[in-house]
Image (spheres, rainbow, N blue to C red):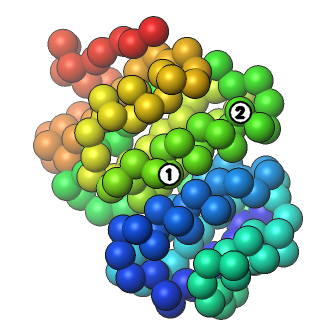
């Protein structure tokens, strides 16, 4: 399932955080992205789009752009100049996934969150400090930092899932 919703009332980072936190509370969502320039929220996963609409309508006005039952596997996207952080988490169920997404959605600068339950990986993208993500998640889950990629690494063509030696950090 994929839902693309227009949220014209998104004005600042505070509104973005509220929309992401609200969306991450909907059961079955695997991916949330908010584009502040266009005021568009994209969510994918196995979720009820009506529940997502009802939750978001409590915050702001919502216009449906697209609801697609086929869905897409969206990973990446966004603009240059940002950080991509991937962490491995010990997630047991949907409730743990929602909790992790809510925690990360409150971090200033995060505009994309993707959780893969079968791999136990959470990927966040935006303009933020990766250590802040790890510190927040460590309070609730065992965390292993898998990847930190900056725009500088992407420009060099080093986006094949590996960083330069010494850039990879592990946290337990």
Q: Quadrant of residue 67?
A: bottom right
> Residue placed at 19% from the left, 55% from the top?
81
Left or right, 26 with respect to 80, comes to right
The disc, 1 or 2, on the residue closer to the chain's N-terminal end is 2
Left or right, 7 with respect to 168, comes to right
Does 151 sit above or below residue 54?
above
Disc number for residue 113: none
> Residue placed at 44% from the left, 44% from the top?
124
State the CA–CA distance, disc 1 to disc 2: 14 Å
> Which residue is identified by label 2?
96
Please rate how many residues cluster around mark 2, counting C-alpha atoms within 10 Å: few if below 14, some from 14 to 19, many from 20.
Answer: some
Q: Give residue 88's position: percent from left, percent from top.
A: 53, 22
> Residue placed at 48% from the left, 39% from the top?
123
> Residue placed at 29% from the left, 62% from the top?
79
Left or right, 47 with respect to 18, comes to right
Q: Quadrant of residue 71?
A: bottom right
- Quarter of the picture containing the C terminus is top left
> Which residue is identified by label 1?
105
Q: In which quarter of the image is residue 120?
A: top right
Left or right, 97 with respect to 100, comes to right
């Amino acid at each position: 399932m994929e839902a693309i919703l227009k949220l014209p009332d998104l004005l600042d980072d505070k509104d973005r955080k509220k929309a992401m936190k609200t969306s991450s509370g909907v059961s079955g969502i695997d991916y949330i992205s908010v584009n502040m320039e266009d005021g568009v929220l994209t969510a994918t996963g196995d979720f009820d789009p009506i529940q997502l609409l009802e939750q978001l309508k409590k915050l702001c006005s919502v216009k449906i752009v697209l609801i697609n039952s086929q869905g897409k596997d969206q990973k990446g996207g966004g603009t240059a100049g940002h950080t991509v952080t991937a962490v491995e988490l010990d997630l047991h169920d949907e409730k743990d996934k929602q909790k992790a997404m809510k925690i990360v959605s409150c971090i200033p600068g995060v505009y994309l969150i993707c959780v893969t339950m079968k791999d136990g990986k959470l990927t966040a993208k935006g303009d933020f400090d990766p250590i802040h993500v790890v510190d927040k998640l460590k309070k609730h889950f065992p965390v292993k930092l898998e990847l930190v990629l900056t725009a500088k690494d992407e420009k060099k063509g080093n986006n094949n899932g590996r960083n330069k030696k010494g850039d990879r950090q592990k946290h337990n």
